Amino acid sequence: MRRSQRPQFRAILILSVGLARAVNAQNNSSTADLPAKVSSQPGMKACAAGTDFEAEKYRIRQASVEDPFKFLYWSRIRTQFNAMLGNQLYTSKLRSDGFSLVEKARSANSDARFVVRFEGAYVQNCDAATKTLDLLYRIYSTDPPLTLGGATESQAVAETSPQTTAGLTQGGSPFHFTPTGGYDRSDGVFGGGRMQVTPKLAGFRLFDTFTAQGQGSHSMHSFSAALSGSANLLRPIRKLDWRIDYQNDLAPGGGTSLAKAGLSGQMNGETQLFWKGSTLARFGGLLQGGNMHSDAPSGLLALQTVSNAGYGSVKGYLGLSSRTSHNVVSASYGLELGSVGPAARVDWRKHIGDVTDEFWIPVGDHKPFEVESRFTAGGIQVPHSVPLPVLFFGGDGGDGSEFFVPGDAWQIRDEPVIRAIPANRLFLTSQGIGADRFASLNLTLSYPVKVQPIMPKELSTDPEFQRLLHGQIVSAASVEQNYYSWKDPNFAAALKRLPHLKQLLASLLTAVTTAQTAHPNTLQDEFTDCTTNISVADFDATNALAAKDVSQYGNLAALLPVDSGDLAQVHTACALTLNRQLNDPGIEAATAAVDAARTAILNDFNAIDQKLAARLAASDIAFVSRTLNTLFRDLNIFSIGPVAVFDTAWIGPAKGDVGGNRIGPGGGVRLELASYVNFTLGYAWNVDRKPGEGGGALFFSIGLRDLFR
Amino acid sequence: MADSPTNAAGAAAAPLPVALKVDFTLTTPDGLRKIFFGLEKDTDGVRVNWIINFVLSERSGPTKPFGDPIVSLNVFVATALHAQAALAAQNGLTPAQTAHACGPAANAAMAVHNGTMPPAVGNKIIQGTLSEQAT
């Protein structure tokens, strides 16, 4: 369904024109003051309100920018910015030019559906003796991506890379490189990185991103290279993305090594939001083929398990994700049908269920107490045979290999995770190495003790700023509501009556003109008023019929209000004012016909389900409001605090000390310096340790900033 | 007196705001049009002006870059309309206001521009946008 948006800009244009015309007739200034709720600067001199800094020829001693995402563009414009503003005479034009330079450099994602922005310019450190001042720009904006509907992956991105959520990642270099690293007792110290290239080449439309990432240590490596693309669509599917991926992994596990190499192609889809804009559905499919290899002795393998095999598999997966103000939850189910070798049969079936939830409540300003929980369960049915690496190996996850499908957009975990046991070391079952069923529950509780919010408290709690921001969202919702009202079948019914109404207005005009000819020099003002109102009504009816988009709604609506609508004015001017004195039977009959037509149109118009239109509009805008609330009220540029973890994992089949349940409580510290580094360091104890298992494990992960930004 | 020194205790002096801008940008679902609408509260000496910024950009395909704007307006808001402009800025435009602006006001502006409607009539219709009732 293609919809026209022309009325949106026409609305804004005409409002602007109307206000501009009013300016010509009236003074354009007042003495109201701007809010002054901004943070103080130690050691700075005050600047007095009411000073005309431009007229008094103040010079800018120093200009600066405060922007949480300044690091994205500052190096590119610093020289130009300083040259433009430094030691220059202060003028409002120069101030605006400074704004423009920064706005252009921020280079927001041009495809963002909805962008909101706040900008403030301030003067400080004013010195009357030297006629100098400092100029400060404060800029905060967000253009939340269309796909920020409610998936837990989106919340993770918002926390670790808020500039992505704010829609500012499209600027700057098309090359991005992010070092990664970590430690696990199985893998040892490992390091690597992720390179992403967004070429934006004309004619290269199927794929728009190339990603290569890898990590390695003395005992493991993982590497993947992928081409991916995506398209934003109209309802009901709002986004499709596709990916071709090559993966090559080697990891220790089960006392041996597990190797996988393969090529896959996948496509995922995401629906529009539903259930009051809180929920979306996702679905996808993947086709994969390659080789799996292990060094495990055959005596340790379960029946029907092979250590080396070529394979092919098909995966299908679907899920629901929901986001409310302080909770994000995703539930996913995946099914894999696999075959060993080129055989056209199903040798194994893998089922995965994964539910993850993140809940947070503010305890102090920008200090959310967070509870992350994840429950995952899986099972494998083996009608014929299955390669060993397909089976479940549990332990500390985090190396990126524990997901059902590749890519970051949708992460369905498919192995038991318990941080108290090194990666892939929970594997022994009553049938051999590798489990064919598992369930795990992971809880992480965290609370930042030291934070630096993205949005300064002075601004996020400024009631005027809140009102202004809210006003922009309301305007957008109003435009959306009119669109849905215009699509209502009752509006179409009302519109169909307009040609007949135009005929009746023409008949009335003829009757009035005839009467005026018969009564020259009589009631001239009344005749003029009547014919003018007929013309205005005909003007709006004609435009409503001529338009092909949502502007029809406004034109028709203008005809109808009881006290001020075009047709009510016709009735007043022609029937009540003119003809009450003239008593012309032709005018009386014609006005009665117009009144009847108006009543019929009004009945159809009033039948439009405005509540439904308002609800649909609210749903469209809801994701914007939620994302803004999260960015402004909860997220931090910097935070540090303790974490507590609790894991339990069960693998089977179990018998005695092999397989069964493990419990791992622990704790540590988490530091997030958004876009620069984030890491979690901690230790978890293996409370119910079995023979051959350690007493616990250190877990550590680190992510560094994109070096090319 | 344009400035004053920090106080004896070295307490901080708050920066003085001289401009405040709030705006939103809408990109149409087909990706072909981008509409920017902003409200700017701007000091000019001792006075305050409300200014509406409006920019419209178009492109021929969703993968092509937006070129220079085809419409770019900075409009001073009359003093008499400051209260209503402030209300529109703070509360947003109602559906009735946006409907009026999309329909009759847009047509009136074009008609006045084309010389087919007297400016006084057009002005009355256009300014009616701000006086539309909330729905």
Image: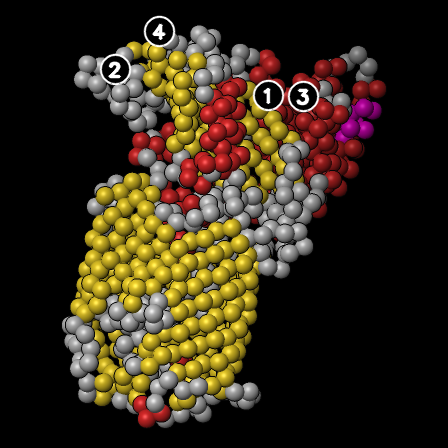
- Left or right: A534 as drawn, with respect to A377: right
Question: Hey, what amino acid is under mark 3?
Answer: Val
Label number found at residue B6? 2
Marks 4 & 2, CB-CB < 8 Å contact? no
Label number found at residue A20? 1
Report the residue marked by disc 3: B121
Question: Hey, what amino acid is under mark 4?
Answer: Ala
> The numbered mark 4 sits on a residue in which chain?
A
Question: Hey, what amino acid is under mark 2?
Answer: Thr
What main secondary structure does the magenta stretch of the protein show? helix
Q: Are marks 1 and 4 on the same chain?
A: yes
- Left or right: A26 as drawn, with respect to A498: left
Q: Nearer the viewer, residue A121 or A282?
A: A121
Query: How far apart, in angstroms, are the residues tagged by discs 3 and 4?
Result: 54 Å
Query: Which of pointers 1 and 4 indicates the residue nearer the eye?
Result: 4
Vertical side of A538 occupied by A436: above or below: below
Query: Which of pointers 3 and 1 indicates the residue nearer the eye?
Result: 1
Q: Are marks 1 and 2 on the same chain?
A: no
Query: How far apart, in angstroms, are the residues tagged by discs 1 and 4?
Result: 40 Å
Query: How far apart, in angstroms, are the residues tagged by discs 1 and 2?
Result: 42 Å
Vertical side of A241 occupied by B89: above or below: above
